[in-house]
Image (cartoon, rainbow, N blue to C red):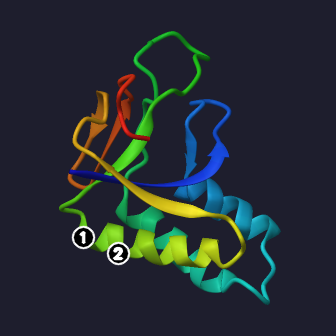
Amino acid sequence: MLVRFVTDWIDEDSCEAAGLFVAASWVRHNGDPAEVNLARLAELREWFNQHLDTPRRFNRSRRPHRKKKAISWFKDSALEHIARAREMARLISASGVSVREIRTKRPGYILYEDEFQLVAEPFAETDR
């Protein structure tokens, strides 16, 4: 099973629900420090920068400048990553941005995979 954290926003590249890190970036720049622990959010973001590789590909096409259609999922075995993502989701939600956790067994065409995550262009029937 794979886990993803999404908002109600639509990502302009993938045309899918924007994920946790897009929302964290928005909150970092626009969040009210009285409502959100911005320092803790920054710590969590830095932890992910150190413990989660950035995939190189976000579309099946090898053509330059193609839209990034793929979306990222945590593997359910990435327990520490998911726990920290849930904490990020709680912090982001405190700013008024709705974040929900979704799961799937069929993420789509896999473009990248490592120990903790995979990136896939979704099938038409993929939960997202």
In the image, residue 23 above or below residue 56? below
Q: Nearer the viewer, residue 1 or 58?
A: 1
In the image, residue 18 above or below residue 60? below
Where residue 120 sits: x, y (%)? 35, 32
Q: In the displayed image of the protein, which residue is found farthest to the bottom? A: 34
User: Is label 2 in a helix, a strand or a loop?
Assistant: helix
Q: In the rendered view, does 38 fall on the left or right side of 91?
A: right
Cα distance in 3D space between marks 2 and 1:
6 Å
Where residue 13 sits: x, y (%)? 62, 30
Q: In the rendered view, does 71 fall on the left or right side of 7?
A: left
Where residue 122 sits: x, y (%)? 39, 28
In the image, residue 61 above or below residue 29? above
Q: Nearer the viewer, residue 34 or 51?
A: 34
Kind of residue at disc 2: Ala
Number of marks in picture: 2
Taking the spot 44% from the left edge, 13% from the top edge, the residue there is 61
Q: Nearer the viewer, residue 30 or 124?
A: 124
Judge the density around disc 2: few (<14), some (14-19), many (≥20) Cα neighbours within 10 Å.
few
Q: Which residue is mark 2?
A: 83
Kind of residue at disc 1: Leu
User: Is label 1 in a helix, a strand or a loop?
Assistant: helix
Taking the spot 37% from the left edge, 58% from the top edge, the residue there is 52
Q: Nearer the viewer, residue 19 or 48?
A: 19
Residue 86: image quadrant is bottom left
Judge the density around disc 1: few (<14), some (14-19), many (≥20) Cα neighbours within 10 Å.
few
Labels 2 & 1 near each other (Cβ < 8 A): yes
Taking the spot 64% from the left edge, 59% from the top edge, the residue there is 23
Name the disc covering residue 79, or none.
1
